[in-house]
Image (tube, rainbow, N blue to C red):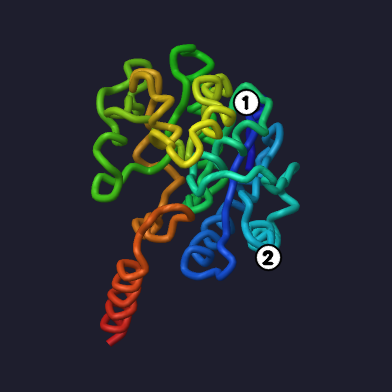
Amino acid sequence: MNGDFSFLKPISFSTCSYMRRHPGERAKMVSEAISSWADLLDLPFAEKYFLDDRSPDFGAFKLLASGHLLGKFTHAEYCTISHAPHSNFGILRSLELAATPYIMHLDDDVFVTDTADQCKEAINLAIHVMENDPAIMGCNLLHQDPSFHGAEWLSDEPYIEHASLFHPKKYFGAAASVIRRELLDRINFAQIMAWGEKQPGIWEALVTNSPKEFVVGAANSPFQVKRTSYFFSATNEISTRVRFQYLVKSKLKAFLGKG
C-alpha cells in the first residue's frame, strides 16, 4: 500500500459479532468474511474496535483468535450488558465505543473482495464527501445487488456533487459504511435499551431522516455480502426447516455440478 493515509486519522474502525454455542454454517461464513479483512485491518485507523456481543463461551473472540486477527484490533471487548436478541444492540454498542468524528463499520458477514488499496480509495471518497458536505451523515460502501437487497436500500437519485455516488431510495444501509459519529445522537444505546424487545426497526432505518443525508458508494465496491447471509444471521427468525431446505438444495446443486 502506498500514498497518503492522513485521511484515516479521524476514523475509527468498529465491528461486532455473536457466535452461538454450537457453531455451524454461520460461523464458517463469518470466519471466511473476517479473514478477508486482514489487509484492511492493516490500514492506520485511529482505533480499531471489536465487540463480542455476549457470545456463549466467548465464541466471537475465539473465532477471531483462530484466524490470527485479534491482535489487529486496538480494543477488543465483551459486552456485559444483557439485552434482547436484536442486531441493534451489538452494532450500536460497538459504534459508541469509538470517539473519533468518523466511524467505519463492517457487519461480521461482509467480505472484502479486493485489495487494501481499493478499500482505501472507497473510504477516502466517503471521507472526502462528508468533509466537504456537512449535510451528508453517512456513506454506504456495500456493493449493491438488486436481486438481493431490497429496493428501498438501493441507489436512487444521483448525488450532484459526485458522478459515481447516489442517494439511497429510502434508507441508509450501515452494513459496510462510514458515518459521522454525531449520527449516534439520533438514537443511542440508552434509547434502544429502553425499547427492549420491542425495537421499532433496525437502527440505520430509524436514523434515516431523509435519504438526501446519505450516499451510496460506487458499483465496484470491494465490500460485499453473500446472498446466503440472511439465512445465517445471528438474530433472525428463519426456521430450522427453511435452513435445512436451503442446505439440502445447496449440497444437491454442488453434487450435480461435479457430475
Q: Residues within 10 Å of mark 2 (few under 14, many from 20)?
A: few
Q: Which of the two residues, 5 or 194, is positioned nearer the viewer here?
A: 194
Does label 2 or label 1 sit earlier along the sequence?
A: 1
Query: From where the camera sits, is residue 214 visible?
Result: yes
Amino acid of disc 1: Phe
In the image, is 209 to the left or to the right of 85? Answer: left
Mark 1 — residue?
7
Q: Secondary structure at mark 1?
A: helix
Q: Which labelled disc corresponds to residue 66?
A: 2
Amino acid of disc 2: Ser
Return the x and y of residue 193 as percentages of the image width and height: 55, 34
Q: Which of the two residues, 60 or 131, is positioned nearer the viewer here?
A: 60
Q: Which of the two residues, 125 or 107, is positioned nearer the viewer here?
A: 107
Q: Which residue occupies 47% across, 42% down?
A: 197
Return the x and y of residue 161 as percentages of the image width and height: 37, 16
In the image, is 223 to the left or to the right of 69? Answer: left
Vertical arrangement, residue 4 with respect to residue 142, above or below: above
Q: Which labelled disc corresponds to residue 152?
A: none
